[in-house]
Amino acid sequence: MYVNYLFEGVLNLADMKINVNAVWDGGVKGNGTLRAESLNTKIAIPTAKGGSGNGANPKEVLVSSVTTCYTAMLVFTLESRKLPVAELTVNSEANISDNEFKIIHYPHIVLSAGASEEQIQSAQRAMEAADKGCEVGNLLKKADVKIEIQGKVSSK
């Protein structure tokens, strides 16, 4: 993703109204669609639970939501610091067991050639600031989901 836009303000979920529609067909082995204003995706029950597996399962949707929130906050934070971002990617991994639900974000920020050491350090701090500012992640943390950031910053 190339970062070349500016968020108009801090992302605040408290001021949002979101409508989501789920339509299901075919029982447990069937699948459905999940739609919102800017979302349209297939959903399904995982094969491990007896479903078709032909769509995103609820845990994938949840992890996708927190990854989207973290990424948006990271973009906002980097832009507000006026850092010369050339590229930004965020990969996330969820480890889910009976005892723990843990999400690890792996952001990689590539700054433009000639970025100063101060800018590199600011980008590194931005990764943690974005985690603290992500309201979806903060809600999950209240439910004992562990979220870690293992990012890196480089320059072209």
Image: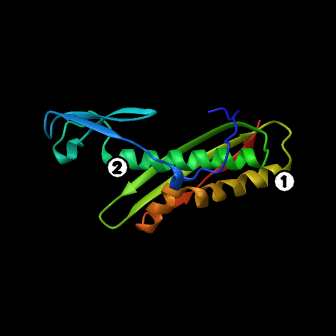
Asked whether disc 2 touches disc 1, contact meaning CB atoms under 8 Å apart, the reply is no
Work out how far the residue at label 2 is from the one at label 1, CA to CA, in angstroms. 38 Å
Which quadrant does the N terminus fall into?
A: top right
Q: Quadrant of the C terminus?
A: top right
- Residue 43: image quadrant is top left
Residue appearing at x 78%, y 55% in the figure: 121
Instruction: Report the residue marked by disc 2.
Output: 59
Q: Residue furthest left?
A: 27
Pointer 2: residues within 10 angstroms few (<14), some, or many (20+)?
Answer: few
Dot 1 alpha-carbon crowd within 10 angstroms: few under 14, some 14 to 19, many 20 or more: few
**Pair 2/1: label in front:** 2
**Type of amino acid under label 1:** Glu
- Which comes before the other along the chain, label 2 or label 1? 2
Residue sitting at x 36%, y 41%? 20
The amino acid sitting under disc 2 is Lys
- Image x and y of residue 124, in percent: 71, 54
Instruction: Note whether residue 143 is visible.
Output: yes
The reply, left or right, for residue 53 in relation to residue 129 is left
For residue 118, the mark is 1
Question: Can residue 146 be seen at all in this image of the molecule?
Answer: no
Residue 34 is situated, as x and y percent measured from the top left of the image, at 33, 36
- Looking at the rendered structure, the secondary structure element under dot 2 is helix
Q: In this view, does 84 lie to the left or right of 66?
A: right
The residue shown at (48%, 50%) is: 66
Residue 87, numbered label: none
